[in-house]
């Protein structure tokens, strides 16, 4: 209806101007068109338009940027294959994207083959996350297939959902005979003049009888030598060796396996392990002013350990505190005041056992990490294991069959950060009061109850005598391991590999042995006559420095505070080790399995033209056609404005010719 009105209005106005008093037909027609266009533009009609959108299938190209590619002299070969892919016509069919990967996935810019770790599974997992589409997409994976960190990338079901992997295998795929040290197990601590065990696992994939020699060396000196024999029916061997700890201190050993003739991969023929040799005996002092069966039980349990020497004295005896690493204070009374004073001054470790003869008024006055409000009655306390205890692994004692310990009844208050090993149970109800508890800030422990000798007796009857002895030993071992509560404590490993960060932590304590968060320490690092001063960062309870770019060698360091009033030194060794050097062959079998699992196909660099052709002609990947519908207003057609201007110009020209202007 609006359009009819627009036509009528345009006709009426045009006729009034050029047909009513004069006959100007051409001017009438032109003016009619002008009025009509203006009115139509004011009405601004709209109509729908359907637009076709073509979406190409995605194609991802992942290039291995790890050092193993360069070690196999495949870096130029991989670059050449990548160049051929870029020069192909795959971009006509696919919307391609290029990435590189080592430890993680990143956009491709250039390749330097410097990544010291390879995580193929992580790269594919991130790729599966990026490709958010129901349509499957092909991945061209340019790699040697070696993945030395992360999970196995072959059978990850998440990758099969929307990706087809087409591996291009780089590197030597021939199988070579190999002899390797698979694992070395050793206790990091040993005692002087004692033998410590070393467990080594060696294996080979050779198909004939093999004789080799295994040596253990320290600073080039051979300490142990043994001949081994492997065969097709006996591909691996477990070796149990024994070395003598002759000298106190930190020792680094190298275990070496003789290489096969023409063995290509020899990096796995050697391994390193460290052992710290400690003083062969720990001296423990048991102080008690009473005679009690508990003393005999403790003495018998510790006597079976050749590395522990236990002395028994009274509080009134002459005691050299510095001669002992830890102390057992049995039912202390006011007579122990001098002992406690010396223990606090020397920051010694102790284990208090309380009972009916304990002077709780005296203990509460000593301001220890615990206190107890006692009543004038005694109670039986049964043990309940705390599953959250973390100081050490508790032995598997059958607690339900153990008799109760006896002590004054009362409420126990813990005044510091603690770790509870056993709670107490009274009349069948768990009281959530500690029975055996440790101070986590200092090496201190307390057992609230006497008659532990009955635990030893019943454990023996139940065939758990070793478990009880182990409990006593572990308490003493925990207390005496670091007997001196230094105001500066260091935490670090003695050995690192080049591929892992070197982390050194330092904990500073104030005069009250609380964490000092105000200190601003520095680490002074010395190596090959070079000295570097590195500030340590505060991490709350400790300060830390992380070193990531160290070369192999021995490093000495000193941690000190700003005024140098506290300092402590140490050293560590960085071993020349690279995960990439452990694998100098292509893992074609795993890449074939990956291709099969994801519905792809395996290729080699000389088949790159076939890969390109297969993807160009593949019917599995096709463009998706979609349509977009939208309303388009007439005013968006700019040519109508040009037509309007042209008509006005024409009208002006006609009037000019008629002499009306």
Image (spheres, rainbow, N blue to C red):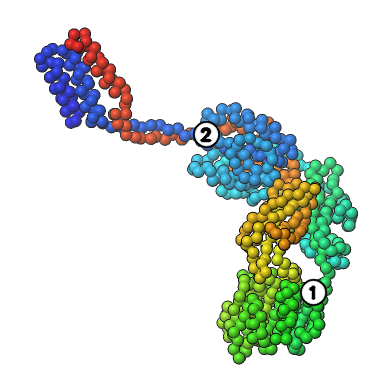
Please identify the quarter of the rendering in which residue 17 is found: top left
Residue at the left extreme of this rendering? 21
The residue wearing badge 2 is 95
- Residue 67 higher or lower than 343, as above or below: above
Which residue sits at x=66%, y=80%?
Answer: 366
The residue wearing badge 1 is 322
Q: Position of residue 102 (x, y in %)?
A: 65, 43
Q: Position of residue 26 (x, y in %)?
A: 19, 13
Mark-to-mark CA distance, 2 and 1 = 76 Å
Q: Is 227 displayed left or right of 65 in the figure?
A: right
Residue 67 seen from this side: yes
Please identify the quarter of the rendering in which residue 628 is found: top left
- Provide the secondary structure element on which disc 1 rests: helix
Which residue sits at x=77%, y=81%?
Answer: 286
Foreground of the two, 592 or 60:
60
Q: Quadrant of the C terminus?
A: top left
Which residue sits at x=59%, y=41%?
Answer: 106
Residue 384 seen from this side: no
Total count of labels: 2
Mark 2 or 1, nearer chain start: 2
Q: Position of residue 98 (x, y in %)?
A: 58, 36
Foreground of the two, 162 or 208:
162
- Residue 128 higher or lower than 21, as above or below: below
- Provide the secondary structure element on which disc 2 rests: strand
């Amino acid at each position: 209806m609006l359009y009819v009105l627009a036509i009528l209005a345009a006709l009426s106005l045009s006729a009034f101007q050029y047909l009513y008093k004069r006959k100007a037909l051409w001017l009438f027609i032109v003016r009619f068109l002008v009025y009509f266009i203006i009115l139509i533009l004011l009405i601004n009609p709209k109509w729908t338009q359907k637009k076709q959108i073509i979406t190409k299938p995605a194609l991802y190209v992942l290039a291995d940027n790890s050092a193993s590619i360069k070690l196999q002299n495949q870096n130029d070969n991989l670059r050449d294959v990548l160049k051929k892919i870029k020069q192909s016509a795959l971009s006509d069919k696919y919307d391609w994207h290029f990435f590189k990967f080592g430890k993680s996935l990143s956009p491709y810019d250039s390749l330097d083959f410097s990544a010291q770790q390879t995580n193929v599974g992580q790269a594919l997992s991130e790729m599966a996350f990026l490709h958010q589409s129901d349509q499957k997409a092909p991945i061209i994976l340019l790699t040697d297939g070696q993945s030395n960190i992360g999970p196995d990338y072959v059978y990850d079901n998440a990758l099969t959902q929307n990706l087809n992997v087409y591996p291009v295998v780089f590197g030597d795929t021939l199988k070579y005979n190999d002899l390797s040290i698979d694992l070395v197990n050793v206790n990091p601590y040993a005692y002087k003049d004692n033998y410590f065990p070393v467990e080594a696992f060696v294996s080979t994939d050779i198909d004939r009888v093999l004789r080799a020699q295994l040596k253990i060396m320290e600073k080039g000196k051979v300490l142990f030598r043994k001949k081994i024999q492997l065969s097709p029916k006996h591909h691996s061997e477990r070796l149990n060796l024994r070395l003598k700890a002759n000298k106190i201190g930190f020792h680094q050993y190298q275990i070496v396996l003789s290489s096969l003739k023409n063995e290509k991969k020899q990096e796995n023929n050697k391994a390193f392990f460290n052992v710290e040799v400690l003083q062969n005996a720990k001296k423990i002092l048991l102080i008690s002013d009473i005679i009690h069966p508990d003393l005999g039980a403790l003495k018998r349990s510790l006597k079976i350990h050749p590395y522990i020497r236990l002395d028994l004295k009274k509080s009134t005896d002459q005691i050299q505190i510095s001669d002992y690493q830890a102390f057992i204070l049995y039912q202390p009374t006011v007579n122990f005041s001098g002992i406690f004073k010396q223990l606090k001054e020397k920051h010694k470790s102790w284990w208090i056992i309380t009972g009916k003869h304990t002077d709780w008024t005296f203990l509460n006055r000593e301001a220890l990490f615990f206190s107890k409000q006692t009543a004038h009655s005694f109670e039986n306390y049964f043990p309940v294991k705390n599953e959250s205890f973390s100081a050490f692994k508790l032995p598997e004692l059958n607690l339900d069959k153990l008799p109760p310990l006896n002590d004054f009844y009362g409420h126990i208050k813990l005044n510091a950060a603690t770790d509870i090993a056993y709670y107490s149970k009274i009349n069948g109800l768990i009281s959530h009061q500690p029975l055996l508890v440790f101070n986590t800030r200092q090496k201190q422990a307390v057992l609230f109850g006497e008659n532990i000798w009955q635990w030893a007796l019943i454990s023996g009857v139940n065939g758990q005598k070793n478990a009880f002895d182990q409990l006593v030993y572990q308490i003493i071992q925990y207390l005496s391991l670091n007997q001196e509560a230094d105001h500066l404590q260091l935490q670090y490993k003695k050995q690192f590999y080049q591929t892992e960060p070197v982390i050194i932590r330092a904990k500073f304590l104030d005069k009250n042995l609380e964490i000092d968060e105000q200190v601003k320490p520095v680490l002074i690092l010395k190596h090959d006559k070079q000295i570097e001063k590195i500030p340590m960062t505060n991490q709350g309870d400790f300060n830390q420095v992380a070193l990531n770019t160290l070369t192999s060698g021995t490093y000495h360091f000193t941690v000190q505070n700003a005024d140098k009033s506290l300092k402590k030194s140490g050293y560590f060794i960085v071993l020349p080790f690279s995960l990439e050097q452990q694998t100098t062959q292509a893992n074609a079998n795993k890449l074939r399995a990956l291709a099969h699992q994801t519905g792809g196909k395996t290729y080699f660099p000389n088949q790159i033209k076939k890969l390109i052709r297969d993807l160009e002609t593949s019917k599995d990947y096709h463009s998706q056609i979609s349509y977009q519908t939208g309303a388009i207003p007439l005013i968006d057609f700019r040519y109508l404005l040009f037509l309007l201007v042209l008509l006005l110009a024409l009208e002006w020209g006609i009037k000019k010719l008629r002499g009306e202007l």
